[in-house]
Image (tube, rainbow, N blue to C red):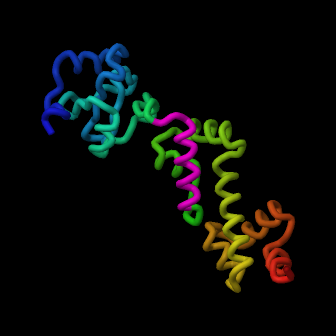
Amino acid sequence: MENSITASIPEDKWLAVLSNDSTYDGQWYYGVTTTGIFCRPSCKSKPPNREHIRIFHHAEEAMSKQFRPCKRCKPASQLLPDEEWEGQARTYIEQHYNEPLSLSVLADVLHLSPYHLQRTFKRLTGVTPATYIQQIRIQEAMKLLASSDLPITDIAGQVGFMNAAHFATRFQAITGLTPSQYRGAEFER
């Protein structure tokens, strides 16, 4: 462990952190034990106490030690291009659509700023994360309406809508039918 994480930060690295020296970016990263966040040497965040700093040779190493990437300097951005962030966001939404999901929750999970997530997701998919969440919820509701006798209020809750009236309104706006009409049309086929 001592060979990959330095217990006491050397003077040159400490001076680089204090001066936000970008010449060291990509050569090493520093993690702050009190926050659990790691940064590039050039990060403009307030310098931490020297005794709380740990040095990492790679961003992956910092993440493997449970440090999260800084949202300001984005030290892991070279690891994941925008397409990978977007793919991770879609996967997370598809696996957690029935939970309370907001842009800030999704951004925290992906270690991105909400603004960057919103802009990148929309640029790559053509829809906002909120719209995508709603689309997935409606698709899942359509499956349940077609394959079960569950009450519509139960289906609304199972797919992540906290309010059955809001569910019915969104369902009709997207499909053109109320949930009851959709269920009836499915049984006629």
| Residue 50 position by quadrant | top left
Residue 80, percent from left and from top: 47, 36
Residue 72 % position (x, y): 45, 30
Expressed as whole percent of the image width and height from the top left, the position of residue 49 reads: 23, 30
Q: Tell me the chief SS of the magenta region.
A: helix
Decide if residue 176 is on the left or right side of residue 94: right
109 in relation to 155, above or below: above
Taking the spot 29% from the left edge, 25% from the top edge, the residue there is 28
Left or right, residue 31 beside residue 77: left
> Is residue 82 covered in magenta?
yes
Q: Quick one: 14 or 149, which is closer to the camera? A: 149
Q: Position of residue 141 (x, y in %)?
A: 69, 70
Give above or below for 39 relative to 185. above
Q: Quadrant of the N terminus?
A: top left
44 part of magenta stretch = no
Magenta residues, start to end: 80-96
